[in-house]
């Protein structure tokens, strides 16, 4: 029986250790969640205050966009800044999930694009759809009844979508900026403890075109640049031909660090947060 007693004690010790690790992990996740929530609240309050004033300030700002098939337009003016958020509830407590900052960039120029083959017409249509640009397409048929030419009358307004989301478990905040720097998407990752008033001030300056260092901020951005620098020091033939922006995007996708809503997270938080 002595040996059985030893096995029983060993099993109980392992079970207790596992329970302690589970509790420690749950506490760590909860602390990360609450930290991210505090930073999302700070972002939301900052953006709401910013939006009150930025419509006036942005009147003196112009942005440049290249539209395929038309060319470069350098007099787009930002307007109508709006801030809102998506939220969720845990045991009747409300928490921020995503924060949105939206505005439009408008030009007085008329944007008309003409394409002269079915393939080019389809490519232009896909391009405008992906950029969220509204347009009216008028197709022209040849004597055989086939479409061989089309004109695209593009609305002279570009929607800009900026989104702050989070990985609550890893305490990270993600920033996505669509159609801000051209008709593309730029993404940034910040540890929650990097998001403070100084960082938000740099973001606001970046938004209105003032000199600043926003794009240099963040440990993840710095790590990405270091990877690019190392690869360029000993580049592979194909990689060496890439421009810095494309190379950085490849490194970001290789890291695979995207915001994720893991199903088990809210469940593990529910019991702990309900006691707060």
Image (cartoon, rainbow, N blue to C red):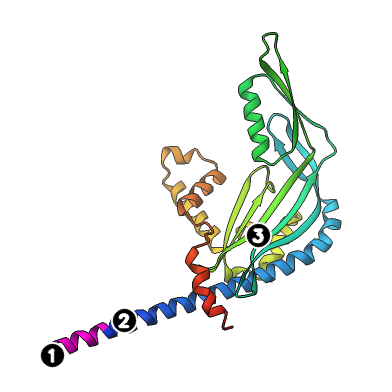
Which dot, 3 or 1, sits closer to the camera? Answer: 1
Residue named by callout 3: 214
Label 1–label 2 contact, CB within 8 A: no
Q: Residue at x 64, y 19 (%)?
A: 117
The magenta stretch spans which residues?
1-11
Q: In the rendered image, which quarter contains the C terminus?
A: bottom right
How many other residues sit within 10 Å of disc 3, few (<14), some (14-19) or many (≥20)? some
Residue sitting nearer the eye, 67 or 161: 161
Which dot, 1 or 2, sits closer to the camera? Answer: 1
In the drawing, does residue 262 fall left or right of residue 64? left
In the drawing, does residue 274 fall left or right of residue 108? left
Q: Which of disc 1 and disc 3 is earlier in sequence?
A: 1
Tag on residue 15? 2
Instruction: Please check the rendered image and state whether residue 20 is part of the magenta-colored stretch, yes or no.
Output: no
Q: In the rendered image, which quarter contains the N terminus?
A: bottom left
Label 3–label 1 contact, CB within 8 A: no
Q: Which of disc 2 and disc 3 is earlier in sequence?
A: 2
Vertical position of residue 248 compared to residue 40: above or below:
above
- The location of residue 203, given as percent across then percent down, is 69, 61
On the image, which quarter does residue 205 sit in? bottom right
Label 3–label 2 contact, CB within 8 A: no
- Rounded to the nearest angstrom, the CA distance separating label 3 from label 2 is 48 Å
Residue sitting nearer the eye, 234 or 38: 38
- The location of residue 267, given as percent across then percent down, is 50, 71
Tag on residue 95? none
């Amino acid at each position: 029986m002595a040996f059985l007693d030893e096995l029983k004690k060993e099993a109980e010790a392992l079970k207790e250790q596992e329970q302690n690790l589970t509790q420690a992990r749950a506490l760590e996740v909860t602390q990360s969640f609450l930290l991210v929530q505090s930073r999302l609240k700070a972002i939301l309050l900052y953006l709401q205050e910013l939006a009150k004033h930025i419509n006036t300030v942005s009147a003196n700002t112009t942005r440049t966009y290249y539209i395929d098939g038309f060319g470069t337009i350098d007099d787009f003016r930002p307007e109508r800044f709006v801030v809102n958020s998506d939220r969720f509830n845990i045991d009747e407590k409300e928490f921020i999930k995503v924060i949105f900052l939206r505005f439009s960039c408008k030009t007085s120029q008329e944007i008309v694009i003409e394409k002269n083959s079915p393939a080019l017409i389809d490519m232009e249509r896909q391009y405008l759809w992906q950029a969220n640009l509204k347009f009216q397409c008028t197709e022209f048929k040849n004597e055989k009844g086939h479409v061989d030419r089309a004109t695209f009358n593009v609305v002279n307004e570009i929607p800009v979508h900026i989104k702050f989301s989070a990985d609550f478990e890893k305490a990270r905040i993600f920033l996505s900026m669509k159609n801000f720097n051209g008709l593309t998407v730029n993404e940034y990752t910040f540890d929650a403890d990097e998001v403070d008033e100084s960082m938000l001030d740099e973001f606001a300056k970046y938004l209105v075109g003032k000199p600043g260092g926003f794009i240099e901020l963040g440990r993840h951005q710095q790590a990405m640049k270091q990877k690019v620098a190392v690869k360029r020091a000993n580049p592979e033939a194909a990689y060496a031909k890439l421009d810095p922006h494309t190379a950085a995007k490849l490194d970001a996708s290789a890291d695979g660090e995207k915001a994720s809503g893991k199903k088990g997270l809210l469940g593990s938080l529910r019991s702990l947060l309900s006691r707060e």
